[in-house]
Image (cartoon, rainbow, N blue to C red):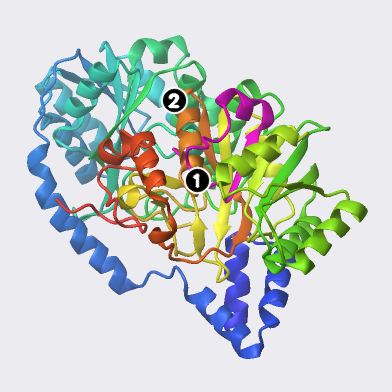
Amino acid sequence: MALAESQAKARREGLGVRTVLALLVREAKFGPRHLARKIIAYTGHGRVGRAELETARSEYQVWLDQQEAGLEACAEGGLVSIIMPTCDTPASFLREAVESVRKQTYADWELCIHDDASRDAEVVRYLRREASGDRRIKISLGSSRGGIANATNAALALASGRWVAFLDHDDLLHPAALSELVERAIAMDAQIVYSDHDIVSESGERSAPFFKPDWNPDLFMAQMYLGHLVIAERALVAQLGGLRPEFDGAQDYDLLLRCAGAGARIAHVPKVLYHWRQHAGSTSSNADSKPYAHHAGRAAIQSFVSTRYPGARVDDSAFTFCYDVRFPLPAKATASLIIPTRDGLELLKACVDSVRATTQGVDYEIIVVDNGSTQPATLAWLNEQQRDHGMIVISSDTPFNWSALNNLAAAEATGDVLVFLNNDTEAVTSDWLARLVENALREDVGTCGPLLLYGDLTIQHAGVVVGMGGWADHVFKGLAPVHHQHLFVSPILRRDVLAVTGACMAVARDRFAQLGGFDETFQVCGSDVELCLRAHRAGLLNVYVAEARLIHHESKTRDARAVPEGDFVRSAEAYHPYRTAGDPMFNPNLDLYSATPKLRAQ
């Protein structure tokens, strides 16, 4: 039973049959009991039971009570036109949605409603009553069904504000929603602003908050993570022609992708300002309720990437409303795999063997930097590899300096992409290198790194959060690599991060040179994060490529005593201001001292 469950789970997580078989064979070497324990442990990882969900709900309610007092801003920044298409909306939901607009602390608003030929006469009567009794409410009534994009465009035609805000007919705005969004737009000179959100039940209970990162282009190509509450400059929306009916079901996704493609300045308010209604038939309660919307989303991204990244294609991921963008890979693209080592032949050999047995799609060279190996078996193996298999071996009998060793090899490398790889890693998917190379060669990318798993198949690396643990650490560390959006983003969706780990980092060779390589004032650790921060300051993206997977046999606990004092000093300098101001690719509502996403104590 456990084996069957683990196979099913592996399929859900995107692990292919060959990968699973290879992992089973490796673990079986340690005996049947060891293998059985691994299977049972893997099957149990990541399960969330009813008790855990109830605990999360109660913790969120306590957190909400502490937060609400802090949302009293009342900005002035021009008229906001709230756009709401309706169609046979349940009367109670529609009344609550309209009342949530009336309760706004921001006074300068108008509500523009177009009804898409509701068959329920009560909807039309209600809208007419509201419009006759409140001059701020404008309505138009369709005589025939036009679809969600046409209905939204009809509501937009009523708008006269500087800003437009989109509100679904059955959802709710927080009273401070417009104030907070407009205030952020003015402060940041932004054209698009979005917020965090949660889910509200039919009984009014709030749960399942989604705390988002700041603007994250790669995550946005993987998932429409911005959600429903977005304000946009009306002039920008008009310039782009409004919403396109051919993308019905993902019409808002398509519009925002086009805004991003036009270079819109996008900002984020890290506060829960929108409450997404959960009821039968809504996507908040059943992601499979609107399969046409998933297909429309894929088409919208394809339209975007065809212009932004010519030659890119959009595939379905294993999960509804999530997507897998494949970027064009030049036919002659090559990679240089750079592996520093000192003895440790068993680890090094397993690493190299796994690369050769698994990797497909990209030609590569292997460069091993031997930092003073003395064991005869290691030296003999390196000589054999150099003589018979074309491996490049660079000898450096100097005091250990991770940065200097990698810079030394980078100067000798000929590949278009440099892949800095620890000797205790193992490749487990055939396309791991192709995926890293195709992302590293994008003109907007500085560095990229894969999903790294411990030997027990829990997460070792799924992106670095600068400031986590006081310095920098791996979010999701020790969790199962499952698609689960609890408080923060899914750990197995591609996204932009401030940094990726040097245990496996890919950088285009010319970009590495432009950035100046690794800073050799760091001896053991910290220079990987520092390089990523330099790339970020240069306007480049650092991408966590979740679809590329390797095993990393690093211990789950690192002995801080092995890190020289100088590395702490340099890290303190290099990581400023993110250690105190926060990592924009994380969320300030989450605890920086917990690798597992957790609400920050107030």
Q: Amino acid at mark 1?
A: Gln
Where's residue 586, x and y in %? 36, 43
Task: Name the element at disc 1.
Answer: loop
Label 1: few (<14), some (14–19) or many (≥20) C-alpha neighbours in 10 Å = many
Q: Is residue 559 above or below residue 49?
A: above
The disc label shown at residue 523, or none: 1
Q: Is residue 272 above or below residue 458?
A: above
Q: Was residue 559 drawn as part of the magenta stretch in this picture?
A: no
Q: 38 or 474: nearer the eye?
A: 474
Q: How many marks?
A: 2
- Give the quarter of the image for residue 415: top right
Q: Amino acid at mark 2?
A: Arg
The disc label shown at residue 537, or none: 2
Question: Residue drawn at (42%, 18%), measured in percent from left and top?
Answer: 264
Question: Residue drawn at (29%, 56%), measured in percent from left and top?
Answer: 598
Question: Residue drawn at (32%, 37%), measured in percent from left and top?
Answer: 578
The disc label shown at residue 43, or none: none
Q: Is residue 341 above or below residue 337?
A: below
Where's residue 145, x and y in %? 44, 30
Instruction: Specify whether 228 is left or right of 36.
Output: left
Please state which of the two labelled residues, at mark 1 or mark 2, is closer to the viewer: 1
